[in-house]
Amino acid sequence: MALKYAFSAYNKELMARVVGRDLSISKKQSVEICKWIKNRPLKQAKQLLTEVIAMKRAVPYTRFNWNVGHRPGMGPGRYPIKTATEILALLKSAEANAQVKGLNTGNLFIVHCNAQKASTPYHYGRQRGTKMKRTHIEIVLQEQAKKEEKKKEKSEKKTEKKIEL
């Protein structure tokens, strides 16, 4: 069975990806964490998730925040330890994939982070069956040039235009 990816603009030379299938974590918590770490540098995202696991920083809940208590210095938030642990393991795996491809792990950014609902088979018990929580997560990392290099390139282009005039 071939996997269908949610991220279609994947470039094999510049990007690395990882897919977690049928993870036994909550989809709602995964959506909130994915929204929180998207478009961040990989180092910063890993640091944030380790702080969540240590219960030093809460994940802000923006969508699934009904009856969620407010945390100091922010609005509604929680400490989804199990979900953060699974996503941190996926980030480390994606970093290893990038390293094998020869990408610079210091310049990696999270371009795409997506959580989707997976199948929910039953846990059979004494009274009735209860559904399991399962989630698919897809993470794509991209190597980006540092901001200083981009500024130098822009200033060089401006000086070239001035010289031409």
Image (tube, grey):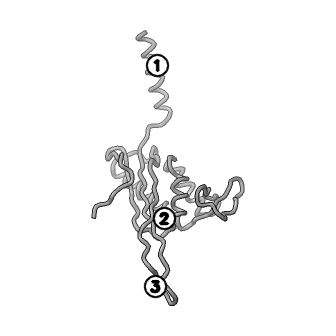
Label 3 and label 2: CA atoms lie apart by 25 Å
Q: Residue at x 36, y 45 (%)?
A: 9
Q: Which residue is mark 3?
A: 124
Visible in this render: residue 52? yes
Q: Residue at x 56, y 59 (%)?
A: 50
Query: Disc 2 residue type?
Result: Glu
Query: Disc 1 residue type?
Result: Lys
Q: Secondary structure at mark 1?
A: helix
Residues 96 and 135: in front is 135
Q: For marks 3 and 2, give the one nearer the viewer.
A: 3
Q: Which residue is mark 2?
A: 86
Which image quadrant is residue 32 in? bottom right
Residues 146 and 116: in front is 116
Query: Disc 3 residue type?
Result: Tyr
Residue 154 in picture, x, y percent from top left: 46, 25
- Residue 15 as seen in the image, left or right of residue 146: left
Q: Which residue is mark 1?
A: 158
Query: Looking at this rendering, what residue extends furthest in the right direction?
Result: 72
Query: Looking at this rendering, what residue extends furthest in the bottom direction?
Result: 126
